[in-house]
Amino acid sequence: MSTRLRSAVSRRRLLAGVGTGLSTVAVWGLAPLVTSGSPPDSRPKVIGHRGAEGLAPPNTLASIQRALEVGVDGIELDVRRTSDGELLLFHDPVLDWNSTGQGWIESTPWGEIQGAQIDGEPLITLPDALEVIAETDVSLYLELKQAGYTDAVLETVDEYGLLDRLTVIAFETAALDPAQRRGVSTGLIGSAPTSQLVADAANYGTDSAFCHYAPHLTAQFVDDVKAEGQTAGVWKLVDTEETVRDAIEAEPDVFVTNRPDYAFEHVDRDTSTQ
């Protein structure tokens, strides 16, 4: 089977949308049979972090495929630029830290990176991911690690007709400026759920603000962001079933998680008991 899937349909969506009689249909290699639409008001959009990092190596086709299989509403990926302008999906600035590659990404051409792996899965570029995502209906969240290549990212996403599904996110507003000018959705990220992050996002005028999950603090952050008329997002980087449940109970609009399967288990359990 080709590593570049034309689409991925989640078993969960198949069962919910067209009945249990289709439960034996293979989920890989099919055109979408059921579109996701919008999630119910009672739950957040569930976004797979770096694809689904808790289920497969991050920012790889395998991770994207696992997220789609689980049935995510969207996929978040990290984007960096190589020395020759390729848009690489990778979190850290240095390849050695988490792959078989070597060197600083911004100083290394794609030809020297190509073939490197992370936990047995090849590193990929943004177009590799977009080929898969374009055949689905999921949202796309791209975290830009630096300013300077936002326009290149927007042009690449536009080639696949996905700008209307894109949210550009970053810790620094400079990386968001070109997206703001083009009217593309943006989100400001902060490491902690602070009032300063809420104020910075509101003052800059992003569509959303995202914080990392923190016990006892997340719910107030979510309320404050919503009060500003923005979308409230929560990142969950170290996932257990209990902390995923706690983050969802803070009622964010968007929940970004390494374990989207845990998130759906929780929201599906809540729905079945109502």
Image: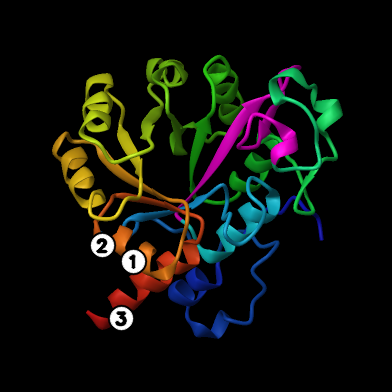
Q: Which quadrant is home to the C terminus?
A: bottom left
For residue 174, which quarter of the picture?
Answer: top left
Question: In the picture shown, does residue 13 fall above or below 47?
Answer: below
Residue at 64% x, 77% y is 25
- For label 3, the residue is 272
Residue at 42% x, 69% y is 241
- For label 1, the residue is 245
- For label 2, the residue is 249
User: Residue 38: in sight, yes or no?
Assistant: no
Residue 270, percent from left and from top: 29, 75
Callout 1 secondary element:
helix
Callout 3 secondary element:
helix
> What amino acid type is highlighted by mark number 2?
Glu
User: Residue 261: in sight, yes or no?
Assistant: yes
Magenta stretch bounds: 73-97
Measured in 3D between alpha carbons, the distance from the residue under mark 2 to the one under mark 3, in whole angstroms, is 16 Å
Q: Nearer the viewer, residue 167 or 218?
A: 218
For the residues bearing labels 1 and 2, Cβ distance under 8 angstroms: yes
For residue 177, which quarter of the picture?
Answer: top left
Q: How many marks?
A: 3
Measured in 3D between alpha carbons, the distance from the residue under mark 1 to the one under mark 3, in whole angstroms, is 15 Å
Residue 44 in magenta stretch: no
> What amino acid type is highlighted by mark number 1?
Arg
Residue 184, percent from left and from top: 41, 26
For the residues bearing labels 1 and 3, Cβ distance under 8 angstroms: no
For the residues bearing labels 2 and 3, Cβ distance under 8 angstroms: no
Residue 81 in magenta stretch: yes
Disc with the residue nearer the chain's start (1 vs 3): 1
Residue at 64% x, 57% y is 65
Callout 2 secondary element:
helix
